[in-house]
Amino acid sequence: MWFFMILCYVLVGLSGFGLIQIGLNHYFDFWLTNRITFDLMVSIIFIAAQTLVMFFFVGTGVNVREYLEKHIELGDGLYKKMFAIKRKLYPPTMMVTMLFMATVIIDGIYYIKFNTEGRISEWWFHIFYLLTLYYFFKATKVQHHSFKESTEIVLSMTKSARTNS
Protein backbone atom coordinates (compact mmCIF):
# COMPACT_ATOMS: atom_id res chain seq x y z
CA MET A 1 0.00 0.00 0.00
CA TRP A 2 2.70 2.48 0.99
CA PHE A 3 4.77 1.73 -2.10
CA PHE A 4 1.86 2.54 -4.41
CA MET A 5 0.99 5.67 -2.47
CA ILE A 6 4.55 6.97 -2.75
CA LEU A 7 4.61 5.98 -6.43
CA CYS A 8 1.41 8.00 -6.94
CA TYR A 9 3.01 11.07 -5.39
CA VAL A 10 6.14 10.69 -7.53
CA LEU A 11 4.18 10.22 -10.75
CA VAL A 12 1.82 13.12 -9.98
CA GLY A 13 4.87 15.30 -9.31
CA LEU A 14 6.48 14.23 -12.59
CA SER A 15 3.26 14.80 -14.50
CA GLY A 16 2.90 18.29 -12.97
CA PHE A 17 6.45 19.09 -14.05
CA GLY A 18 5.64 17.74 -17.52
CA LEU A 19 2.45 19.80 -17.70
CA ILE A 20 4.41 22.97 -16.96
CA GLN A 21 7.01 21.94 -19.56
CA ILE A 22 4.29 21.50 -22.20
CA GLY A 23 3.10 25.05 -21.56
CA LEU A 24 6.61 26.47 -21.64
CA ASN A 25 7.37 24.49 -24.79
CA HIS A 26 4.24 25.83 -26.48
CA TYR A 27 5.13 29.43 -25.70
CA PHE A 28 8.92 29.39 -26.01
CA ASP A 29 9.55 26.50 -28.47
CA PHE A 30 12.61 25.16 -26.67
CA TRP A 31 11.86 21.62 -27.90
CA LEU A 32 10.32 22.56 -31.25
CA THR A 33 11.52 19.66 -33.39
CA ASN A 34 10.05 16.99 -31.12
CA ARG A 35 7.01 18.76 -29.63
CA ILE A 36 4.56 15.97 -30.41
CA THR A 37 6.96 13.33 -29.12
CA PHE A 38 7.44 15.29 -25.91
CA ASP A 39 3.67 15.75 -25.50
CA LEU A 40 3.17 12.02 -26.00
CA MET A 41 5.84 11.15 -23.43
CA VAL A 42 4.30 13.49 -20.84
CA SER A 43 0.84 12.13 -21.70
CA ILE A 44 1.91 8.60 -20.90
CA ILE A 45 3.26 9.65 -17.49
CA PHE A 46 0.27 11.91 -16.76
CA ILE A 47 -2.39 9.34 -17.62
CA ALA A 48 -0.46 6.60 -15.81
CA ALA A 49 -0.30 8.78 -12.69
CA GLN A 50 -4.00 9.63 -12.67
CA THR A 51 -4.96 6.02 -13.43
CA LEU A 52 -2.73 4.73 -10.64
CA VAL A 53 -4.32 7.16 -8.19
CA MET A 54 -7.81 5.96 -9.11
CA PHE A 55 -6.86 2.29 -8.96
CA PHE A 56 -5.14 2.83 -5.62
CA PHE A 57 -8.45 3.93 -4.15
CA VAL A 58 -10.36 1.15 -5.91
CA GLY A 59 -7.96 -1.40 -4.42
CA THR A 60 -8.01 0.19 -1.00
CA GLY A 61 -11.81 0.27 -1.05
CA VAL A 62 -11.96 -3.41 -1.94
CA ASN A 63 -9.48 -4.27 0.82
CA VAL A 64 -11.46 -2.25 3.37
CA ARG A 65 -14.70 -3.94 2.32
CA GLU A 66 -13.20 -7.43 2.48
CA TYR A 67 -11.65 -6.73 5.87
CA LEU A 68 -14.93 -5.41 7.24
CA GLU A 69 -16.79 -8.47 5.91
CA LYS A 70 -14.48 -10.64 8.00
CA HIS A 71 -14.76 -8.35 11.04
CA ILE A 72 -18.46 -7.61 11.29
CA GLU A 73 -18.06 -6.11 14.75
CA LEU A 74 -16.44 -3.00 13.19
CA GLY A 75 -19.64 -2.13 11.30
CA ASP A 76 -19.76 -0.52 7.89
CA GLY A 77 -18.85 3.04 8.89
CA LEU A 78 -15.29 2.76 7.60
CA TYR A 79 -16.48 1.49 4.22
CA LYS A 80 -18.92 4.39 3.96
CA LYS A 81 -16.05 6.78 4.69
CA MET A 82 -13.97 5.11 1.97
CA PHE A 83 -16.86 5.40 -0.47
CA ALA A 84 -17.21 9.10 0.41
CA ILE A 85 -13.51 9.61 -0.29
CA LYS A 86 -13.90 8.10 -3.75
CA ARG A 87 -16.92 10.31 -4.45
CA LYS A 88 -14.80 13.39 -3.73
CA LEU A 89 -11.73 12.10 -5.57
CA TYR A 90 -12.98 10.81 -8.90
CA PRO A 91 -14.65 13.92 -10.44
CA PRO A 92 -11.61 16.25 -10.34
CA THR A 93 -9.26 13.40 -11.27
CA MET A 94 -11.31 12.48 -14.34
CA MET A 95 -11.77 16.15 -15.26
CA VAL A 96 -8.05 16.91 -15.18
CA THR A 97 -7.35 13.81 -17.26
CA MET A 98 -9.86 14.80 -19.94
CA LEU A 99 -8.70 18.43 -19.98
CA PHE A 100 -5.09 17.31 -20.24
CA MET A 101 -5.87 15.07 -23.21
CA ALA A 102 -7.71 17.95 -24.92
CA THR A 103 -4.78 20.28 -24.23
CA VAL A 104 -2.25 17.90 -25.73
CA ILE A 105 -4.42 17.24 -28.79
CA ILE A 106 -4.94 20.96 -29.38
CA ASP A 107 -1.22 21.60 -28.92
CA GLY A 108 -0.47 18.93 -31.53
CA ILE A 109 -3.07 20.30 -33.97
CA TYR A 110 -1.71 23.81 -33.52
CA TYR A 111 1.84 22.60 -34.14
CA ILE A 112 0.93 20.53 -37.21
CA LYS A 113 -1.21 23.28 -38.75
CA PHE A 114 1.30 26.01 -37.82
CA ASN A 115 2.48 26.60 -41.39
CA THR A 116 -0.75 25.78 -43.25
CA GLU A 117 -3.97 27.64 -43.98
CA GLY A 118 -6.29 25.63 -41.70
CA ARG A 119 -4.58 26.77 -38.52
CA ILE A 120 -6.47 26.32 -35.26
CA SER A 121 -6.75 29.38 -33.03
CA GLU A 122 -4.11 29.45 -30.33
CA TRP A 123 -6.75 30.67 -27.88
CA TRP A 124 -8.07 27.14 -27.64
CA PHE A 125 -4.71 26.04 -26.27
CA HIS A 126 -4.64 28.94 -23.79
CA ILE A 127 -8.12 28.14 -22.51
CA PHE A 128 -7.57 24.39 -22.15
CA TYR A 129 -4.08 24.79 -20.72
CA LEU A 130 -5.22 27.19 -17.99
CA LEU A 131 -8.20 24.96 -17.16
CA THR A 132 -5.89 21.95 -17.01
CA LEU A 133 -3.50 23.75 -14.67
CA TYR A 134 -6.37 24.81 -12.41
CA TYR A 135 -7.86 21.31 -12.27
CA PHE A 136 -4.43 19.72 -11.86
CA PHE A 137 -3.81 21.70 -8.67
CA LYS A 138 -7.39 21.12 -7.51
CA ALA A 139 -7.19 17.36 -8.20
CA THR A 140 -3.75 17.10 -6.58
CA LYS A 141 -5.05 18.79 -3.43
CA VAL A 142 -8.09 16.47 -3.31
CA GLN A 143 -5.85 13.45 -3.95
CA HIS A 144 -3.54 14.43 -1.09
CA HIS A 145 -6.44 14.81 1.34
CA SER A 146 -7.90 11.52 0.10
CA PHE A 147 -4.61 9.73 0.72
CA LYS A 148 -4.54 11.11 4.26
CA GLU A 149 -8.15 10.07 4.93
CA SER A 150 -7.67 6.57 3.52
CA THR A 151 -4.53 6.15 5.62
CA GLU A 152 -6.53 7.10 8.70
CA ILE A 153 -9.16 4.50 7.78
CA VAL A 154 -6.55 1.76 7.33
CA LEU A 155 -4.81 2.73 10.57
CA SER A 156 -8.08 2.71 12.50
CA MET A 157 -8.87 -0.77 11.10
CA THR A 158 -5.46 -2.13 12.04
CA LYS A 159 -5.60 -0.44 15.45
CA SER A 160 -8.83 -2.22 16.24
CA ALA A 161 -7.32 -5.48 15.00
CA ARG A 162 -4.27 -5.01 17.23
CA THR A 163 -6.35 -4.28 20.32
CA ASN A 164 -8.55 -7.33 19.73
CA SER A 165 -5.56 -9.70 19.47
Image: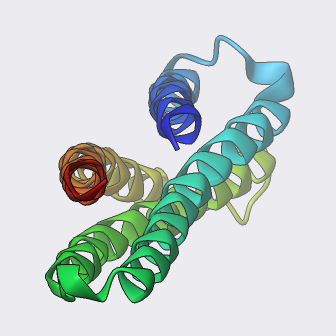
| Residue 145 shows up from this direction | yes
160 or 30: nearer the eye?
Answer: 160
78 or 46: nearer the eye?
Answer: 78
- Image coordinates of residue 126 in percent, x first then y, are 37, 49
Residue plotted at (43% across, 74% down): 67
- Image coordinates of residue 19 in percent, x first then y, are 50, 34
Quadrant location of residue 89? Answer: bottom left
Residue plotted at (73% across, 16% down): 31
6 with respect to 93 (left or right): right
119 with respect to 23 (left or right): right
Residue plotted at (72% across, 66% down): 118
Residue plotted at (17% across, 76% down): 81
Q: Is residue 86 above or below residue 96?
A: below
- Image coordinates of residue 93 in percent, x first then y, are 39, 64
| Residue 153 shows up from this direction | no
- Image coordinates of residue 109 in percent, x first then y, are 71, 57
Q: Is residue 69 above or below residue 96?
A: below
116 with respect to 65 (left or right): right
